[in-house]
Amino acid sequence: MSHNLLLSLLSTLLFTPIFGQVNWSELEPISQSKKAAFIRTAHSKLKQYLVDLDQTEYNLLRDCHVIDMDNDGDFDIIYNGSDGVEGDIVLVLRRDSSQFEVLLHEIGTITEFFMYEKKLESLSILNVTCCGAIHTLDLHYLTLGSPMRIQIDKAYIYYQSTEFPSNNSQAAYREYRVTSPELNMRYSPGIDTTTTVVDAQDAEKTNVIATFPQNARGWIIGKAIDQNGDVWYYMQMRAYPARTVLPYLDYDNLFYCGWMSAKHLQPVEP
């Protein structure tokens, strides 16, 4: 099994999203003075992509990280910080001789940055949407090729108020399918018709965020038991829902995440 394939599998097996912060000081091998001098060499390229560079420039030393991420002897730059009114962005610049090539430009903040044998192997970006949006994206990327490229591996979408499985509620990782004509996905384990309105355009109180058709498939990540004793599975559904308050996004490996009743889910036989 290739190392990238193993990383892809491990990222799928994570049953709660990563909301940590990368310890950049452990990854950066140069002094602050040398770092500042190197960042100045990329000023013109940064200015092309940072809309509010004039406002963020005094934070460049904090938000730019200088790392040789492809082990070619040249330092590269990872910007992980604010872009003023545009919110947080991630900008990955690979240095090739005297030029900087943009490998990744994405809204969000880096929550995982994994190096293997002195090369970047994977990173994760948490994109907490703004301006009235109700969803969050957890994006997982892998690197490939020489010269290095960064490619989206998986995207997980969920309602912003989703309750995640606790660390002691992990379930056996297995593919399941929907057995009923339709099955709702909810942001919490249980039926709630009293406390929440998930869709601003619909006053109905419910914790339903999506509805999947019969035979839709997904993977169980965690489980919980509600106050009535009913079992709920936290699912990553590979299929597109029949209806949802979440957006339909154009990713090859997009997973809708939430809680579904175990009564109407059946394991898929090998």
Image (cartoon, rainbow, N blue to C red):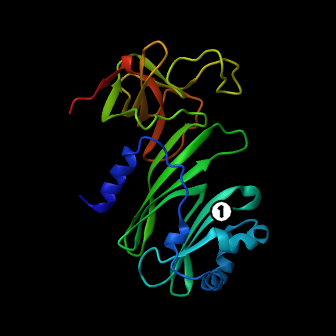
Mark 1 = which residue? 81
Q: Residue furthest left?
A: 270
At 35% from the left edge and 50% from the top edge, which residue is drawn?
10
User: Mark 1, residues whose alpha carbon is within 10 Å: few (<14), some, or many (≥20)?
Assistant: many
Q: Is residue 258 rendered to the left or right of residue 2?
A: right
The image position of residue 201, as x and y in percent, is 71, 25
The type of residue carrying mark 1 is Gly
Residue under the image location 64 percent in, 68 percent down: 63
**Where does the image place residue 69, in percent across and percent down from the top left?**
46, 73
| Point 58% across, 23% down: residue | 207
Residue lying at 62% horizontally and 71% vertically, measured from the top left: 64
Residue 188 seen anywhere in this rendered image of the structure = yes
- Hey, which residue is sitting farthest front in the picture? 168
Residue 32 position in % (x across, y down): 62, 81
Residue sticking out furthest to the top: 228
Locate residue 180: give its quadrant. top left
Question: What is the total number of numbered labels drawn onto the structure image?
Answer: 1
Instruction: Please state which of residues 87 and 28 is positioned toward the viewer in this rendering.
Output: 28
Q: Is residue 103 visible?
A: no
Locate the N terminus by quadrant: bottom left
The secondary element bearing badge 1 is classed as strand
Q: Camera-side residue: 26 or 189? A: 26
Out of 12 and 231, give the one closest to the viewer. Answer: 231
**Measured along the vertical axis of the image, is residue 142 above or below residue 203?**
below
Task: Please indicate whether residue 50 sits to the left or right of residue 3 in the image.
Answer: right
Q: Residue furthest right?
A: 55
Say which quadrant the C terminus sits in: top left
Say above or below: 148 vs 158.
below
Q: Is residue 222 above or below residue 206?
A: below
Q: Residue 184 location, x and y as percent?
A: 49, 22
Nearest to the observer: residue 240 or residue 44: 44
